Amino acid sequence: MSQGTRFDQELREQPAALARLLAQGREQAEAIAEAIRAAAPELVVIVARGSSHNAGRYAQYLFGIRNRLPVAYAAPSMYTLYQQPPVLRRALVIGISQSGQSPDVSAVMEESRRQGALTVAVTNDPASPLARVADHCLPLHAGPEQAVAATKTYTTQLLALAMLSTALGGTAADWDALAALPSAVAAALRLNADIVARAERYRYARQFVVIGRGYNLATAWELALKIKEITYIIAEPYSAAEFRHGPVALIEPGFPVLLVAPSGAAYGDTAALLALLEERGAEVIAISDQAALLARARTALPLPAGVSEWLSPLVAVVPGQLWAGALATVRGQDPDCPRGLRKVTYTH
């Protein structure tokens, strides 16, 4: 990947951005957690767009598994187009947005607060419209992000959500695991230093399927988005389970599949899918910390060992970000100038 692009530079800033959020954001996360406990919400509602929506997919598993809170997604058009918002008085509504500028996300937050729901903004701009309409703001401390395709703001969103979950019901060991993330991300960058050479084989690929499960379903969705944004290759994300319910019919010899399979409860099922992909002749690119699985893949994108599954999306996404950037490079495309896109998108 070209070292001169903003996309690449900001991607490599992630260890420092994560460390900064850990140092500067814990007190605010704990204060927000105290307000959540006082409100005693019955469910969490996420409102977001783009990469931030994929961070919300992580939140669905994070708060559901670790805090036993059901998580739903807001449909902003109910608020802005149909003007028939659902009743959210007993909800915790979390708006996730890198810029905090999208009017429809702010509209959901404003209506939720009017109804008496507790609202929290997770954003890189604490002075943004989203932050202003929320009861509480958890800033990302990522620093300015100029690349159109999000990298460090995505991983800091994941970390902010993980910090909030931990503040709600975690242990000292959980905070220690969070503190180890910057080093783990730095290790993932080192392990995939020669990624352009590995991507050359896929210069003329026309489509990808990206597969994950559990916490890393979010990773599959985010990596599919990155591939589409900066390489213009069609990339479709699926759960390893959902993929078996029809889309597996797509697979024929040479079909490229990006398989996200870090260790954890979801690993066995995701790894089991590999046998079916092999049987059908798929070209598998694997993101994993498991040597046996990486050895079976046509292209291996290794992860460092020792990262708990609930935090693995913060690390597993990094080789995929590198992969998308490398594909753009070998295809002669500039990841800083994806056609038809701007850094801030306004939807209503």
Image: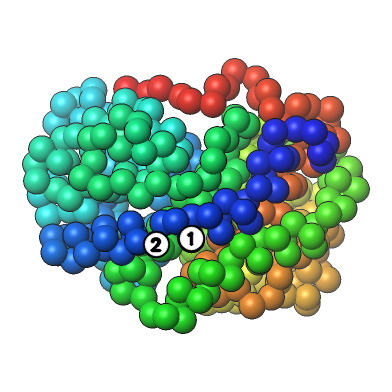
Tell me: residue 20, above or below residue 129.
below
Q: Could you tell me if the residues under marks 1 and 2 are in contact, i.e. CB atoms within 8 Å? A: yes
Residue sitting at 49 percent across and 65 percent down? Answer: 214
Q: Of the numbered discs in the image, which one, if any, rests on residue 23?
A: 1
Q: Is residue 343 left or right of residue 188?
A: left
Residue sitting at 21 percent across and 53 percent down? Answer: 92
Which residue is more in the foreground, 230 or 307? Answer: 307
Residue 135: x, y in percent?
20, 45
Tell me: residue 111, above or below residue 37.
above
Element at badge 1?
Answer: helix
Residue 258: x, y in percent?
70, 53
The count of marks equals: 2
Q: How is the image coloured?
A: rainbow
Quadrant in the picture for the N terminus:
top right
Asked whether residue 37 appears in the rendered view, the answer is yes
Residue found at the far top of this picture: 340
In the rendered image, which residue does mark 2 sit on? 26
Which residue is more in the foreground, 83 or 10? Answer: 10
Quadrant in the picture for the C terminus:
top left
Q: State how far apart marks 1 and 2 are (Cα).
A: 7 Å
Q: Is residue 121 left or right of residue 217?
A: left
Residue 25: x, y in percent?
41, 56
Q: Amino acid at mark 2?
A: Arg
Residue 155: x, y in percent?
54, 52
Q: Amino acid at mark 1?
A: Ala
Residue sitting at 36 percent across and 76 percent down? Answer: 170
**Res 282 quadrant in image:** bottom right
Asked whether residue 235 appears in the rendered view, the answer is no
Element at badge 2?
Answer: helix
